[in-house]
Image (cartoon, grey):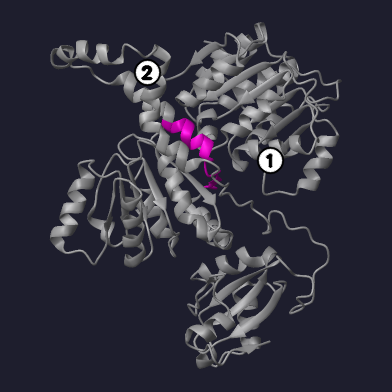
Amino acid sequence: MTNFQDLGLRHELLRAVEALGFNEPMPIQAEVIPALIAQPSDLVGLAQTGTGKTAAFGLPVLHHINPYLQQTQAVVLCPTRELCLQITRDLSNFAKFMPQISITPVYGGASIEKQLRELARQPHIIVATPGRLNDMIRRGKTNFGNVQWVVLDEADEMLDMGFQEDVDTILQTMPEEHHTLLFSATMPEEVEAILNKYMQNPAMKSVGKRNTGTANVKHMYYMVQARDRYAALKRVADFNPAIYAIVFCRTRAETQEIADNLIRDGYNADALHGDLSQAQRDHVMNRFRQGTLQMLVATDVAARGLDVNNLTHVINYNLPDEPEVYIHRSGRTGRADKTGICISIIHTKEKSKLRIIERKVGREFALAKVPTGVQVCEKQLFHHIDRMEKVEVNHEEIDAFLPVIFRKLEWMSREDIIRRFVSLEFNRFLEYYRNAPDLNVEERGGEREYRDKGRPARGDRSDDKGRFTRLFVSLGKRDGTGPHNIIGLINEVTRSRDVNIGRIDIMENFSFVDIDNRHVDLVVESFANKQRNRSGVRVNPADPKDGPKTLARSGKPGGKKTRRF
């Protein structure tokens, strides 16, 4: 039976492996490590998540690193911030007895100044998410002249999240002489395209079956402007031609509106909500169960009686107010040993609500990029070609027509026939997505990127542009609430007196409170905790359109009696 001592690793790595309590290598490690140590080469490793892939590529890469050359010699790309930090920790543990080795994580949502300083020191290994590393490349802050190893970890998930262009850009900046290692649970066409374009005769190491994934749910979110939410939904549908999804909306009216818009725009969709008669409801549900509909737009209540095992996506057009509702929604996909994806389309004011749901689910959700028009067109084109390639031909019925068809098309060349065939289905996508705008909104502000340049005094808004978030509080004048009551309640529920509070607007039945971005998550999460918030006061991010002037014009309760402090 193989053990780590048989794999040819340098003694410092064997000491680290022993200190970590590793005895026998896992199958993917036993396949990959000796191959890369004996003969460095390009390599593709197919294995499920949680099978030890980090050690499979990390140990041989560390084995070949020159610790005395203070230059970046390896770059590891992965899809999420969480995985980036995990890989960095694992590599640091493997390099425990190689003190000269420096490893730097580079990912979005963290201080870019700190990462710039670390990159300037030329770490031996960079572990990065594609978006942030591409940003560093654009800034001219990377030096890949001595890179010998490029690792793509969870390549299928990385491309699912829309990082194709970033990955291409990064790979094109690497030196001509280097080795590429690609690890993936599945091998979709996009991953094979990278293999064919950037890898030279790669060794293939597989543990488990090709194109099989774990029976779980991937959680990801797109961040867009509120006005672009529907456009983002359409791009998700277009980027996934085989989509079979439930789209959850908050209200009956919105559910019907989104379904009507999708039908008008040519999508195979329908609505399910409480205003439908039982006969209408049964008709829609049966069509969806049978696969006649690709997208069902529904409210949570209306979808309760619907049970479908092979959904590809659950899409949150609006985040639910309760994390438990999100868990119920997401549990509708990823069933029967299939992989599912739960997507949320959010705007910047909903980040706090998303963080609460993340903690309830126990997983950090991945920020994905809304596909560009070019990416959508490319995906649709290859889907169309793939359908043509796999179509079953009924020779008995069609062969009789072929002589007439051949005579009609004989004046055209093979290339011209292919062009026309593709254009027949593809022209509408090219037309629609010509000059399509980028819908993505960068994550700015919040606790992960905030830089403390001195705290303004409570209520001082002279230097707080972009640093405060408006929260809705379900207490107002009718409850006898004043500014001191709200401040005291926030201090009590958060168990902190350091929360920086800005302007307070008290209406008749509710209030708005501006909270420093550093403390928004603390406040919202504390009030969501029923043990801390025994009074049951509701606090959540306010709609950015709602403010004292807006409420006064709209005639909502308290609109004419707004008090500002």
In the image, what residue occupies the spot 55% across and 48% down? 364
Using the image, tell me which numbered label, if any, was put on residue 417: 2
Query: What SS does tag 1 mark?
Result: helix
- Residue 468 is situated, as x and y percent measured from the top left of the image, at 68, 69
In the image, what residue occupies the spot 33% across and 25% down? 387
Q: Does residue 44 sit above or below 306 in this rendering?
A: above
Q: Does residue 98 sit above or below 30 in this rendering?
A: below
Instruction: Report the front residue among 314 and 537.
Output: 314
Q: Is residue 504 visible?
A: yes
- Write down the region rendered in magenta: 363-380
Give the residue type that dot 1 points to. Answer: Arg
Instruction: Report the front residue among 477 and 89.
Output: 477
Circle 1 sits on which residue? 132
375 in magenta? yes
**Circle count:** 2
- Residue 522 is situated, as x and y percent measured from the top left of the image, at 62, 65
- Residue 130 is situated, as x and y percent measured from the top left of the image, at 64, 35
Q: Is residue 96 left or right of residue 417?
A: right
In the orientation shown, which residue stands out farthest toward the top? 38
Q: Does residue 39 sit above or below 114 in this rendering?
A: above
Q: Is residue 485 left or right of residue 397?
A: right
Q: Residues within 10 Å of mark 1 (few under 14, many from 20)?
A: some
Q: Is residue 18 visible?
A: no
Instruction: Report the front residue among 101 and 75.
Output: 75
135 in magenta? no
Mark 1 against mark 2, which lies toward the viewer?
A: 2
In the image, what residue occupies the spot 77% across and 78% down? 460
Give the residue type that dot 2 points to. Answer: Ile
Residue 518 placement: quadrant: bottom right
Q: Is residue 454 left or right of residue 38?
A: right
Pick the quarter of the image with the C terminus. bottom right
